[in-house]
Image (tube, grey):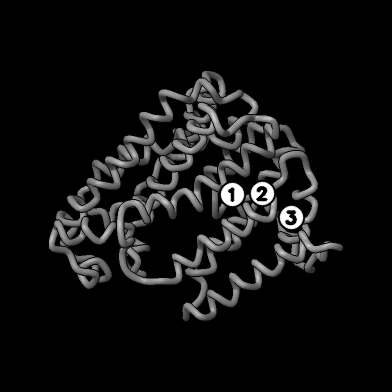
């Protein structure tokens, strides 16, 4: 059996750190959800051809469809066996949620920038936000996400997703799918060749201003609405509080290609502990 805790400690450490604040049973459910997300998110980077990626995503889609068939069918795979139990838990993800998470990854099989900033935000909504909403439902199935609490969860997910794009810029640029909108590149006179070859770091930093501004807007919205979030859902949203530190580090970096945007483990642990005590995500 796959050790989801060990998997996440390596591949998704911040979500795992926040999940540690949950009791054992719901923590295990969060781990299963995050392991599924990791499994599908890594597909585009693990294949050499988009067609192979499409086939693997289709396999995942079919495996989810099987789980919700009548009668359900469970494929012999640790993650989908865990999902078969997870979907039966209170607040467990439904078919639409899981399919949305899978289909969003088709965008990672393409090349080039996002057509518009709206397309970029939509991508974040279908990945980071959708995952956070699913995690929140696992911890508080009765929470109304149509009100202020939902606004807070959306802002937290967007803050994390946009910050993730900033942190992943070196890998995304070299892979030919930079986290910029087409107009942001055009405004700075950047080409995709500049990005794949790691050229013009100062110009790239200027092009990132839109990403930073969008992330800061979401951080402000989260600060204004976070009091609507019950303490029970902190393990599902708390890691978004780490994004502010990552943003400060990224803004100070002179070369976005070569200066990693990271924070020491003890700082992240302390920030999560403080957030769990104060409710300040």
Residue 116 quadrant: bottom left
Residue in the picture at 54% in, 80% down: 52
Say which residue label 2 marks.
5
Mark before the other along the chain sequence, 1 or 3: 1
| Separation of residues labelled 2 and 3 (CA atoms) | 15 Å
Q: Nearer the viewer, residue 131 or 172?
A: 131
Which type of secondary structure does the marked residue at label 2 adopt? helix
Q: In this figure, which residue is indicated by the disc labeled 1?
A: 9
Q: Earlier in the sequence, mark 2 or mark 3?
A: 2
Q: Which mark is in front, 1 or 3?
A: 3
Q: Classify 10 Å Cα crowding around label 2: few (below 14), some (14-19), many (20 and above).
A: some
> Are circles 1 and 3 on residues that touch, CB within 8 Å?
no
Where residue 164 sits: x, y (%)?
41, 49
- Between residue 112 and residue 277, name the one nearer to us: 112
Label 1 residue SS: helix
| x and y percentages locating residue 121 in the rendered image | 39, 50
Q: CA distance from mark 1 to mark 3?
A: 20 Å
In the image, residue 206 sits, relative to residue 248, either above or below, namely: below
In this figure, which residue is indicated by the disc labeled 3? 83
Extreme right residue here? 71
Residue at image point 59% right, 49% down? 9
Mark 2 in CB contact with mark 1 (< 8 angstroms): yes
């Amino acid at each position: 059996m796959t050790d989801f805790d060990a998997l996440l400690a390596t591949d998704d450490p911040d979500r795992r750190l926040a999940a540690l604040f949950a009791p054992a049973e719901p923590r295990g459910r969060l781990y299963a959800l995050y392991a599924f997300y990791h499994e599908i998110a890594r597909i585009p980077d693990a294949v050499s051809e988009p067609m192979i990626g499409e086939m693997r995503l289709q396999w995942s889609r079919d495996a989810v469809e099987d789980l919700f068939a009548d009668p359900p069918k469970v494929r012999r795979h640790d993650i989908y066996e865990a999902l078969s139990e997870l979907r039966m838990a209170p607040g467990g993800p439904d078919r639409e949620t899981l399919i949305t998470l899978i289909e969003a990854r088709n965008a990672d099989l393409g090349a080039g920038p996002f057509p518009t900033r709206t397309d970029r935000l939509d991508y974040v909504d279908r990945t980071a936000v959708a995952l956070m909403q699913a995690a929140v439902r696992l911890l508080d199935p009765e929470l109304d996400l149509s009100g202020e609490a939902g606004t807070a969860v959306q802002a937290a997910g967007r803050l994390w997703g946009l910050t993730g794009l900033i942190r992943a810029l070196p890998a995304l640029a070299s892979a030919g799918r930079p986290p910029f909108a087409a107009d942001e590149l055009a405004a700075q006179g950047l080409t995709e060749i500049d990005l794949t070859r790691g050229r013009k770091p100062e110009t790239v930093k200027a092009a990132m201003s839109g990403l930073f501004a969008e992330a800061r807007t979401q951080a402000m919205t989260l600060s204004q609405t976070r009091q609507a979030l019950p303490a029970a859902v902190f393990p599902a949203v708390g890691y978004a509080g780490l994004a502010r530190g990552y943003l400060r580090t990224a803004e100070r970096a002179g070369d976005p290609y070569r200066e990693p945007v990271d924070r020491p483990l003890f700082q992240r642990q302390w920030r999560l502990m403080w957030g769990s005590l104060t409710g300040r995500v």
